[in-house]
Amino acid sequence: MELGWIVEDIVVRVRRLFGPFRALDWPAFLDLIGLQCRRVAELPVPALLYRGTILVRAGLDDWTTAWWIYHEAGHFLLHCGDQREWRDLACGDLILAKQERQAMEFATYFPDWGIDAAS
């Protein structure tokens, strides 16, 4: 996956503000950006952002949980509004697809996945 310039800029800015983060250090990262996390037993998707809280499906392993938390944090840092607002616009499906790609890029490139994997 190639990192887009918008996400690259956000990754650089967030690292400059808060420093690097190991993948499994997501609780400290969420504290810094003002989000909370709650595990939910029955969630139709792996994670979603709702009113300042990332809801994560209970039972996911630590690495998958971390990836989805950074994905939703990416939405918080990169995008305003919610999906309903964007979906209703002309070409809303294209906008949502781009936002999903950007959130995936953030989750992949912002945290340092290698430090935890080596330990």
Image: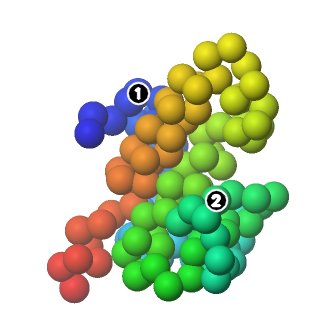
At label 2, the amino acid type is Leu
At numbered mark 2, what does the secondary structure look like: helix, strand or loop?
Answer: strand
At numbered mark 1, what does the secondary structure look like: helix, strand or loop?
Answer: helix
Residue drawn where x is 29% and y is 78% of the image? 116
* Vertical order, 89 against 80 (above or below): above
On the question of residue 34 being in view, the answer is: no
Q: Quadrant of residue 36?
A: bottom right
- The answer to which of 89 and 7 lies nearer the viewer is 89
Question: Mark 1 or mark 2: which comes first in sequence?
Answer: 1
Q: Quadrant of residue 63?
A: bottom left
* Vertical order, 9 against 47 (above or below): above
On the question of residue 74 being in view, the answer is: yes
Residue 61: x, y in percent? 40, 82
The reply to whether the C-beta atoms of the residues labelled 1 and 2 are less than 8 Å apart is: no
Front position among marks 1 and 2: 2
* Vertical order, 17 against 13 (above or below): below
Q: Which residue is mark 2?
A: 48
* Whole-number angstrom distance, CA of label 1 to CA of label 2: 24 Å
Residue 84: x, y in percent? 76, 37
* Vertical order, 56 against 2 (above or below): below
**Residue 26 tag number:** none
Residue drawn where x is 68% and y is 58% of the image? 49
- The answer to which of 11 and 74 lies nearer the viewer is 74
Residue drawn where x is 41% and y is 81% of the image? 62
**Residue 5 tag number:** 1
